[in-house]
């Protein structure tokens, strides 16, 4: 398979220079303005040069036939691309009053959140911190009880006390119903 991304060899360059007028002939015969289509056709032309010299079976045809075909393909694809529906991005006018929240520093927010979490966890006992850590890792109360050598009801009690320490109002359902 031919690699069209490599520069032309010396032989290919000489052949391309010798047959260079083929590009202008094609553009004239196709009725295409050179200013608009030369850059498109030249890539098909250079691909045809490489293909024509690399594949001996193509020598039964005139080079201009192979080159015209390659340039026609590139022009066709370019025209088809131009007809495709383009994606459009919607751009809104910036309104500082509405978008003031967009400029909050996420690093500062994360740091503040971390400090707040550290401050709250410092109010907990080491056992409560350990239980909370295990819960955050996905352990169930029975598993935590086994790891910490406690009864499952003691795990629940420690977490209730931790919540009471962190959240100053009552958490039971009777207080919420009142």
Image (cartoon, rainbow, N blue to C red):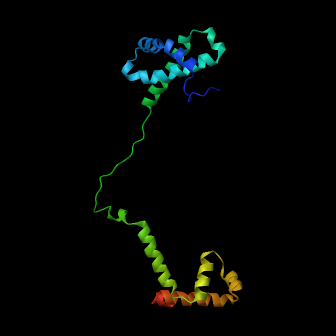
In this view, 27 is above or below 94 = above
Q: Which of 99 and 34 is in front in this view?
A: 34
What residue is shown at x 52% (from left), y 86% (from top)? 163
Q: The N terminus appears in which quarter of the rendering?
A: top right
Q: The C terminus appears in which quarter of the rendering?
A: bottom left
In this view, 106 is above or below 55 = below
- State which quadrant residue 105 falls in: bottom left
Q: What percent of the width, then of the height, locates residue 5?
A: 56, 30
Q: Which of 170 and 139 is in front in this view?
A: 139
Q: What percent of the width, then of the height, locates residue 148?
A: 68, 86
Whether residue 109 can be seen here: yes
What residue is shown at x 66% (from left), y 77% (from top)? 139
Q: Nearer the viewer, residue 80 or 38?
A: 38
Q: Nearer the viewer, residue 58 or 144?
A: 58
Q: Please give left or right for residue 71 compared with residue 141 in the image.
A: left
Of all residues, the one furthest to the front in this rendering is: 10
Q: Please give left or right for residue 169 compared with residue 103 in the image.
A: right
Q: Count all numbered tags in the image, as a single digit.
A: 0
Q: Please give left or right for residue 63 compared with residue 79 in the image.
A: right
Whether residue 171 can be seen here: no
In this view, 78 is above or below 149 = above
Q: Please give left or right for residue 88 compared with residue 43 in the image.
A: left
Q: What percent of the width, then of the height, locates residue 85?
A: 43, 35
């Amino acid at each position: 398979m031919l690699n069209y991304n490599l520069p032309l060899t010396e032989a290919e360059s000489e052949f391309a220079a010798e047959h260079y007028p083929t590009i202008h002939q094609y553009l004239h015969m196709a009725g295409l303005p050179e200013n608009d289509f030369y850059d498109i056709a030249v890539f098909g032309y250079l691909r045809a040069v490489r293909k024509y010299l690399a594949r001996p079976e193509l020598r039964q045809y005139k080079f201009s036939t192979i080159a015209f075909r390659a340039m026609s393909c590139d022009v066709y694809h370019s025209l088809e691309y131009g007809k495709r529906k383009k994606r459009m991005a919607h751009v809104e006018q910036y309104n500082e009053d509405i978008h003031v929240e967009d400029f909050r520093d996420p690093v500062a927010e994360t740091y503040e959140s971390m400090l707040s979490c550290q401050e709250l966890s410092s109010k907990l006992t080491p056992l409560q911190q350990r239980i909370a850590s295990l819960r955050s890792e996905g352990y169930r109360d029975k598993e935590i009880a086994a790891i910490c050598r406690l009864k499952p009801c003691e795990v629940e009690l420690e977490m209730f006390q931790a919540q009471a320490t962190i959240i100053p109002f009552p958490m039971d359902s009777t207080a919420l119903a009142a």
